[in-house]
Image (spheres, rainbow, N blue to C red):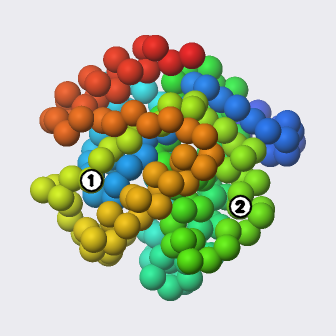
Amino acid sequence: MNLLNPNHPNENDYCPAEPAVKLKKNFIIISGCSGSGKSTLMQELSGKGFKVIHEAGRQIVKEQNSIGGDALPWKDWMKFIELTVSRTMYMYNSMINVEEIVFFDRSIVDQISWGTDSKPVPPYLINAALNYRFNENVLISPPWEEIYSTDNERRHSYKDALASYESQIKAYEKFNYKFNIIPKLTVTERADFVTEFVKGVK
């Protein structure tokens, strides 16, 4: 058994290209503006017993900082995006046999929208977003300036966060996802809202 990924009995089961297009309606994306409380919400949902996949981008930044790598948003945008997309594909595949609700903090759609407004998106990244489909109803955490803060993984300004948010919304529209805004409430109330929302997921 693969102890790191118990859903994969062995590595021979890891076949990302089979089938060509994957659709998991029980995979729910929580997206939205940077610094709007998504990570805290994910922790709250995890505490309620839900399976959660934390944001790949923050993981990559921490890893790159730890090894002195340059796959960082402020150093090499495309390398950073490729790593985050690859990480999300792997986590998606690692949960492919799970039938209960799984929350993903962002998805490939977010990742290919980052910093690509003025640059063409490579076809292989577009294919990743097309081939790895989540539930069409995306939960959106809206901009929330009052709680916005920077840290070692989030160095951009609130103004930059708003610009990225607008790009994300446009990208989700292009990939035919629907928006559901999470209200600005306490984290407990937000988690309750999400819990009620997923009861109607099909």
Q: Amino acid at mark 2?
A: Leu
Q: Amino acid at mark 1?
A: Pro
Which residue is identified by label 2? 125
Instruction: Tell me the element at label 1.
Output: loop
Is 115 drawn above or below residue 42 in the view shown? below
Residue at 57%, 32% in the rendered image: 136
Label 1: how many Cα within 10 Å (few below 14, some 14–19, many 20+): some
Which residue is identified by label 1? 143
Q: Is residue 193 among the parts visible in the rendering?
A: yes
Q: Is residue 49 left or right of residue 21?
A: left
Which label's residue is closer to the chain start, 1 or 2?
2
Residue 47: x and y, percent?
32, 30
Residue 58: x and y, percent?
43, 62
Q: Is residue 189 left or right of residue 75?
A: left
Q: Is residue 7 among the parts visible in the rendering?
A: no
Is 65 drawn above or below residue 55 in the view shown? below
Residue at 34%, 58% in the rendered image: 34
Q: CA distance from mark 1 to mark 2?
A: 26 Å
